Every structure is written in C-alpha cells, then in structure tokens.
Image: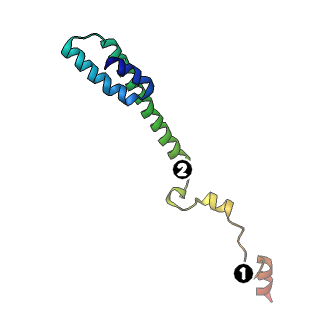
Amino acid sequence: MAILSLVMAFVFWPLAIVFGHIGLAQIRRTGEEGRGLAVAGLVIGYTALGLLVLWLLFFLIAVGASTSTTGCAARGRPGRELDRQLSPPPVHPHGSRRASRAARRS
C-alpha cells in the first residue's frame, strides 16, 4: 500500500491519500517497512489537495471581482455615472428649448 500511495500521488492524488493512510495503518499493525513511501504519498496527496483548494479560492474570488461593479449596478440598476454615459441627451417634446421658449412668448 505504501508503494501504491507514492505512485498514485502522481496519477490520482485522492487515492494517494487513501492508500497512504491504509499503508501507515498496515505498517503499524504488521511492522513492515515502507513508512517513508506512505508518508511521501500522503505529503504529495495533501499538497495537491491544498493547491486545489487555493486554486478554487482564487477562481471564486476572480469571478466575484469580475462581476462586481460600482454604484447601483450590483442591485440591477446602473449607477448615475453609467446612466449619464449611456443615455442620450434629453429631448424636449416640442423640439429644442429655444424653440419652446419662442413658442411660449408668441
């Protein structure tokens, strides 16, 4: 089991962890040699697990950072600055403001 733990560390790391623990228990029980191989498989397996967890955290933080925005956009409404940038200038119903002022005077 200790040899399998070390081999699986490079092939499929979850099995390296399982075989490493089984191998250590067997070595304790029977007094066989190979403790170093079992420990090496466990170290590599748990290191791979730690790297996976770090990668997942990095990925989740990166996705969260890329989807967050400023203003009210996080609640589904664009912020005022974004609203100003995207909205066309207001148009008076009777044309320009000058035209409406002239119409009111006459």
| Name of the residue lying farthest toward the left | 29
Q: Quadrant of residue 44?
A: top left
Assess disc 2: are there few (<14), some (14-19) or many (≥20) residues with their C-alpha within 10 Å of its C-alpha: few
The residue drawn where x is 76% and y is 77% is 97
Q: Are marks 2 and 1 in contact (CB under 8 Å)?
A: no
Q: Is residue 34 above or below residue 42?
A: above
User: Which of these two is toward me, 60 or 80?
Assistant: 60
Which amino acid lies under the numbered mark 2 shown in the image of this protein?
Thr
Q: Quadrant of the N terminus?
A: top left
Which amino acid lies under the numbered mark 1 shown in the image of this protein?
Pro
Q: Which residue is mark 1?
A: 93
Numbered-mark total = 2
Pinpoint residue 40: horizontal percent, then vertical percent. Answer: 37, 17
The residue drawn where x is 36% and y is 21% is 4
Assess disc 1: are there few (<14), some (14-19) or many (≥20) residues with their C-alpha within 10 Å of its C-alpha: few
Horizontal relation, residue 16 to residue 81: left or right: left
Q: Quadrant of residue 46?
A: top left
Q: Quadrant of the C terminus?
A: bottom right
Pinpoint residue 39: horizontal percent, then vertical percent. Answer: 33, 17
Q: Which residue is mark 2?
A: 67
Give how far apart the Cα atoms at labels 2 and 1 are. Answer: 38 Å
